[in-house]
Each structure stands twice: as C-alpha cells, then as structure tokens.
Amino acid sequence: MNMNKISLAMLPIIAVLATGCGGDDGSNGAAGAAGAPGVDGTNGTDGTNGTNGTNGTNGTNGNLAVFTVQLTNLTYSQPFSPAAIILHEPGYNAFIDGEAASPGLELLAEGGNPADLIAEALAATQYLDAVATDGATPPRSIGATSTLLVPLLDVDDLRISFTTMLVDTNDAFTGLNAADISNMAVGQSVSFMSPTWDSGTEANTETASTMPGPAAGAAGGGGASAGFDAARDDLFDRVHFHSGVVTNANADDASKEGLSTSVLTEADRWDNPTARIVITRTR
C-alpha cells in the first residue's frame, strides 16, 4: 500500500476530529456599555383631605355663681369714670359716711382711677371678686355689662360695693357700700339707686386745674394729671353727702350763689339719685 496516499487522504478527517475533541473555547468578551436611563414615571394622584375635627364642648364655671352688673348714668351732663365693682363678704367697706377716705377711694374720687381701690379690696380677707368697668359711662346712658364670679358657698352672705366718679367735679362719687345681695336666685335681678358722695379729700374749687373731666378740658385744663393730688386740702377730710356743685352762675352778683373760680355751668348740676345699678344672677 502506498502510505503517502493514505496519509494525505485522511488529513481532512483528522483535522476535523482534532477540532471537535479536546479543543479550547475562546475567552468571553467584555461587558457591553450600560444603556441610557429610562424616563421618570408620572406622579401619583393626591390623597383626599381628612375630615374636620369636631368642636370641643364649652367649659363650665364649676361650683361658681355668676353675676352681671350694669350701671345707668342718670345725670344730665356728668360723665362717670370707670367704676370699681367689688363682691365681698360682710366686714369690708369701700367707704363709710363720716370716716376718712382710703387712698384708693381718694384716687378714684379725684382722678377717676379705680385701680387702687380694687387693690385695697383684693387685700381684704372678705374679698371674693372685683372688676373695673370698661371706660367711662356718658350722661343719660347705660354702661356695658360687667361679669363677676363667686363660690356657690358664699352667695348666702354676699355684699356688693360699687364706686364711680362724677368727673366734672373735684372729688364727687356715686355708688354702693356693702349692699346686701345674699341668696339671689338664678335669673333674679335687684336694682339700687345711689346718691352722690364727697370724698372730703379735695376742696371743691371747681377750677380747670383741679378737675379731670371735659368741662375742665374745655376751659384749657383737665386731664388725668389735673385730677388726683395726694395732698388733702379739704378741711373736712371725711366722706360725706355731696351738696352739689356751685357753678359760675351769678358769680358776679354778691347777693346770689356763684363761684368765680368755677368752670362749671348749670348743666353740670345733678339731682339725686345719680346712678342706677342693676345686679343679675345668671348662674
């Protein structure tokens, strides 16, 4: 046999067998580049609003009795200052006829300021509640309603004191001193008519420089600083019933009443009572 021919004829077969048996695979290729980011998704829809909360219930005043107080100015032309309203037990007095006025009453009667009188009441053991009215009460008008609270246990022996200045005067005031309002029923009202008192702390010169009201202001004086003076120049220096203003009417006629220093007119006079005070128990 010709061996050269056999070898040459079998070469393609051997080559195929060599490739299929025991050959080495090619190595893996490098990873491809990352693709571009996808587009953002759309926003979700808003949630629905929650329901409104319910209103809380009104609080109560507990074991307290509630009283309202309202002032009527009965004068023709005298404005009333802010008033001091005090609820208390027996034993406290805002003023006493025939006795010297306290510093707090002097400040109210001369300058129309109730702050010190309320502070004096607050320091008393008989004190229950107090409030100053909101602003002045004009002539021939009804003032705003004030509200005060006291423990239910104290309504069986309850007193009210009320003071307000007639501001077109030197030291005149009207009000109540320890008026008895014990055992008022809920819904009940009581009323008091009050005269005018003189605190006895300032001489009744009726001048523009010594009074705080509009009459003095119209004459070029007045103002809060013109009202109160700690020095007491009234020789009597005792709370007493006020006999009324003199005014400047007939001041030039020696045979008639008249005060040459006065800036007041006949319109500033008053008849008693000068105030009506209504107390109502509402709770």
Image (cartoon, grey):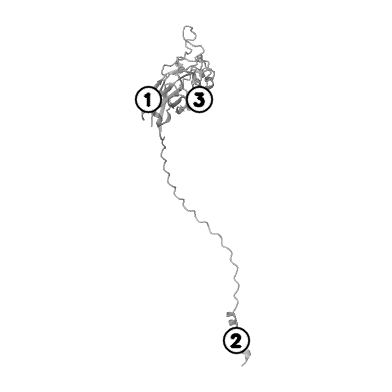
Q: Residue 72 placed where, x, y %?
A: 41, 23
On the image, numbered disc 1 is attached to which residue?
190
Label 2 sits on a secondary structure element that is helix
Give the mark nearest the N terminus, 2 or 1.
Answer: 2
Residue at numbered disc 2: 10
Asked which secondary structure carries label 1, the reply is strand
User: Can residue 66 be spotted in the picture?
Assistant: no
Q: To which residue does mark 3 refer? A: 116
Of labels 3 and 2, the one closer to you? 3
Q: Quadrant of residue 159?
A: top left
Mark 2 to mark 1: distance in Å?
Answer: 141 Å
Horizontally, residue 187 falls left or right of residue 131, namely left
Q: 80 or 30, which is in the foreground?
A: 80
Query: Which circle's residue, 1 or 3, is located before the other in the chain?
Result: 3
Which residue type does callout 1 highlight? Val
**On the image, which quarter does residue 14 sit in?**
bottom right
Image quarter of the N terminus: bottom right
51 relative to 92, above or below: below
Which amino acid type is shown beneath numbered disc 2?
Met
Q: Are marks 2 and 1 in contact (CB under 8 Å)?
A: no
Residue beneath the point at 58% across and 82% down: 17
The one of 173 and 81 positioned closer to us in this rendering: 173
Q: Is residue 69 above or below residue 245?
A: below
The mark that comes first in sequence, 3 or 2, is 2
Q: Is residue 162 above or below residue 283?
A: above
Image quarter where the C terminus lies is top left
Pointer 3 with pointer 2, Cβ within 8 A: no
Q: Which residue ends up furthest to the right in the rendered image?
A: 4
Question: Secondary structure beneath disc 3?
Answer: helix
Residue visible at 37% across and 25% down? 190
Look at label 3 and name its amino acid: Asp
